[in-house]
Image (cartoon, rainbow, N blue to C red):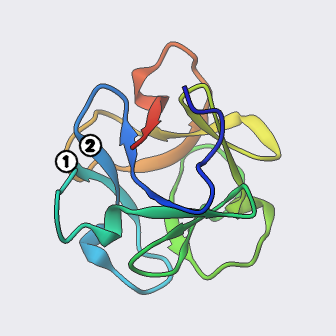
Amino acid sequence: MMEQFPPNREFGIRLRDTNFVLDVNNSGTEPGTTIILWNARDEDNDNQKWICENKNIVRNKKTGLVLSVPGLTPNVQFDTQDVTGEENQRFEYYDYTISAQTNDNLVLGVAGTAVEGGRVSLIERNNDSKLQQWEII
């Protein structure tokens, strides 16, 4: 089991026990483009590839934008933004969970059900929920 984002290499982030990965919606390159679940693709998939910087900032390969949430409050949807380095862009990966660096009770999860196009949000931790468990691939 990996206990942090891998340094210095590209990776995908897959919802555990599924083929769904974090995807920049429609390969959008503008700040504010939402992050959704989408089936993993074998090619033309740079919008599904991520690179970790400074141990906790996760940048999309295609867009150069980083994972972000508007604020560290539950039920806000993840999107991509220009890097600011603020706490709403800093995340940790441990034990299949991606959490806000400053509040490990707020985690990246799926709001609703795991379907193609499903919404990825910052939600309150539930250790029993498969919708909050992620694998680095």
Residue beneath disc 1: 116
Question: What amino acid is labelled 2 in the image?
Answer: Phe
Q: Is residue 41 above or below residue 131?
A: below
Judged from the image, the secondary structure of the residue bearing numbered disc 2 is strand
Within 10 Å of the Cα at label 2, are there few (<14), some (14-19), or many (20+) other Cα atoms? many
Q: Earlier in the sequence, mark 2 or mark 1?
A: 2
Viewer-nearest residue: 90 or 129: 90
Viewer-nearest residue: 87 or 16: 16
Residue beneath disc 2: 20
> Which image quarter: residue 49?
bottom left
The quarter in which the C terminus is drawn is top left
Q: Are marks 2 and 1 in contact (CB under 8 Å)?
A: yes
Q: Is residue 35 above or below residue 130?
A: below
Distance between mark 2 and mark 1 Cα atoms: 7 Å
How many numbered dots are placed on residues in this image?
2
Q: Is residue 25 above or below residue 109?
A: below
Residue at position x 41%, y 39% in the image: 110
Residue at position x 57%, y 77% in the image: 81
Viewer-nearest residue: 72 or 82: 82
Within 10 Å of the Cα at label 1, are there few (<14), some (14-19), or many (20+) other Cα atoms? few
**Mark nearer the viewer, 2 or 1:** 2
Question: What amino acid is labelled 1 in the image?
Answer: Glu
Q: Position of residue 12 (x, y in %)?
A: 39, 52
Left or right, residue 44 beside residue 83: left
Left or right, residue 30 beside residue 72: left
Residue at position x 23%, y 53% in the image: 117
